[in-house]
Image: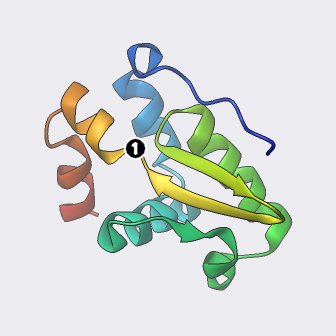
Amino acid sequence: MKSLSHPSIKNINVEQILYALSEPTRLAIFKELYSAQDEKNCGSFSSLGQKNNLSHHFKTLRECGIISVRIEGRNRYISLRNEELDNKFPNLLKAIYDNS
């Protein structure tokens, strides 16, 4: 199984998170994942744009430490790093979700 690199939680800072979520498509991806509270297949985000553009947004969110991507066969499953981020930045994701 192929795996992607994800930053360690200790290397994630709030500036990266706010930068990543300042873009409307990435914010919409975040909001869908936050409300789902579970992983989603990357294909379920097709209403937000074309596959190549979404791939870029997923990469940015992953590299900033907001999401985790799990590859299974030809499918990619996206989930928020909710628990890890909430431990490091209590209630930050909830505040972003509630105020966007």
Depth check: give the residue in front, 5 or 31. 5
Height in image: 63 above or below 27?
above
Q: SS of the residue at dot 1?
A: loop
Where's residue 22, x and y in %?
47, 48
**Crowding at mark 1 (Cα within 10 Å: few <14, some 14-19, many 20+):** some
Instruction: Locate residue 97 relative to residue 38 in the image: left or right.
Output: left
In this orientation, which residue lies closer to the viewer: 24 or 66? 66
Name the foreground residue: 22 vs 14. 14
| Residue 6: % across, % down | 60, 30
Colour pattern? rainbow
Q: Residue furthest front?
A: 1
Residue at point 54%, 45% (across, down) = 68
Q: Residue furthest bottom?
A: 47
User: Where does label 1 land, which residue?
Assistant: 81
Measuring 63% from the left and 51% from the top, which residue is drawn there? 70
**Residue 12 placement, left or right of 53:** left
Q: Residue at x 85, y 63 (%)?
A: 52
- Quadrant of the image containing the C terminus: bottom left
**Residue 47: x and y, percent?**
64, 85
Q: Measured along the vertical axis of the image, is residue 96 above or below residue 29?
A: above
Residue 94: x percent and y percent?
A: 19, 54
